[in-house]
Image: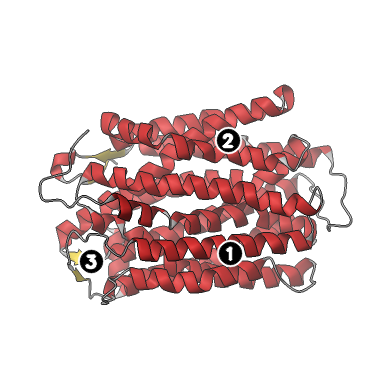
Amino acid sequence: MIAPAVGVPTVSRGVRLGYGVGSFCTATFGAVPGLLLLYYMTNFLAVPGWLAGIVVAAPKVWDLVINPLVGRWSDRTKSRLGPRRPWLLAGACTLPVMFYLVFAGPPLTGTPAAIYVGLCFMAAATAYALFEVPYKAMPAEMTEDYHERTSLLQWRIIFVGLATMISGVLAPTIVNSQGENGTLGSYRLMAVTIALIMFAAMLGSFFGTARAPMTAAPHADTGGLLRQFAAARSNPAFVWLLALSCTQQLAIATMLAAAPYFAAYTLGDPKTTTTLFAVLVGPMLLTMPLWVRLAKRFDKRGAMILAGLLYGIGTASALATPIFGPVYAHAVLLLVGTGIAGVTLLQFSMLADVIATDTATTGHRRAGVFTGLWTAIESGVSAFGALIFGVIISLGGFIPSQANTPVQQPDSAVTSVLIGQTAVPALIIFLSVLMTLKYRLTDPTKAATPVTTP
């Protein structure tokens, strides 16, 4: 194991745990709407697949405005609580309420229902930005050591896995508790349960990071937001890493949106959504020490390539599920989950490297601007996963329905579900592997300054 550099504060276990528990919010808010919102609208509110996909994707356009603003505000915040933690508290007080309202609307169907859900989801996305953008900025300010960041962030990813496991298993279980396909009442029960979990996690992270170290106290960048955008855009390492991450997140989001359909129409049992999620996120709880070692052995770039290959091979192999059955599907998705675990850890570790290097080079604190841009663009791209899948099943002839009037889907729709779950994400993730080949990181003893090749 490579020891932290001399003079670099080591983040205590208590702070690591306190920081990591915040991922119960970030993972849950991504997992539950990504898993259930599209299905909820098409199968309970009679919203066409293409329109439901737009509803999931459209609020993310607002993220391009609010997330960088929140990042800039947190960069400039001066408080006895530090620049980031007041925003964590603001998010904790608003997001759970808005999340509940997404699934607890008036008795609307079709386009009116889509408008209501879209407005509530936009408000929830705003509240989420208050927490998530400052939260992502914190690791780069806790330590200056290249490998210490990966070690710190493994705790975040462990909690991401645990939160995704809980939300991905608990949410569908609650939904299906009042019937095989759920009811409007079971969706509301699910929403209030998940909202309470997020509230507890967000408060836990706020209090748990009270003693988090700050490696330096640079001045916030006083330039205008557009000038700071230009500075981020002119950083080739940030731009390339952002493009790579967005490609990976698009593949993950497409699979996430497809999961309940894959369970219902390919495996023939909606309740297998729970076990599918378990094999996808279980590796996040078990493989983090392995990925930390691989990142040290092969550097972060090499480990990222390996993770992407595992992900892509597993996803492509799932195309044979109709031939080999449910056990086979779970086995190959376990391989996918191992790849997702590595990809997720290394994304955030590389982002922390880029931010820390920018701070050391410029002498300005603008981590919030970087993470604001990152979160806005990444979440927008992730939302397009639902849109892509919604368009795929619409082209396949998928018939929307209401809870009390289920319909028999044509064979073309069932085939489109399989393609959307397997072939499309596999092509996207293999593209990300090619992109990773273009990324370079210098030796850790040279501050891990990332460079890209043309």
- Whole-number angstrom distance, CA of label 3 to CA of label 2: 40 Å
Q: Earlier in the sequence, mark 2 or mark 1?
A: 1
**Which percent across, then down, holds residue 60?**
53, 64
Identify the residue position indicated by label 3 in the image: 365
Nearer-the-camera pick, 434 or 355: 355
**Which percent across, then down, holds residue 387?**
63, 54
Nearer-the-camera pick, 111 or 89: 89
Q: Earlier in the sequence, mark 3 or mark 2?
A: 2
SS at mark 1 in the image: helix
**Which percent across, then down, holds residue 270?**
75, 43
- At 67% from the left and 37% from the top, the residue drawn is 419
- Around disc 2, counting alpha carbons within 10 Å, would you say few (fewer than 14), some (14 to 19), or many (20 or more)? many
Which quarter of the figure is the C terminus placed in?
top left
Q: Which mark is residue 279?
A: 2
Q: Is residue 133 visible?
A: yes
Q: Is residue 372 visible?
A: no
Instruction: In the rendered view, tell whether residue 174 sits above or below residue 77.
Output: above
- At 49% from the left and 55% from the top, the residue drawn is 24
Identify the residue position indicated by label 1 in the image: 195
Q: Earlier in the sequence, mark 1 or mark 3?
A: 1
- At 58% from the left and 28% from the top, the residue drawn is 332
* Number of numbered discs overlaid on the protein picture: 3
Which quarter of the figure is the N terminus placed in?
top left
Nearer-the-camera pick, 200 or 403: 200
Q: Which mark is residue 368?
A: none
Instruction: In the rendered view, tell whether residue 339 sits above or below residue 164.
Output: above
**Which percent across, then down, holds residue 353?**
26, 49
Which residue type does callout 3 highlight?
A: Arg
* Mark 2 vs mark 1: in front: 1
SS at mark 2 in the image: helix
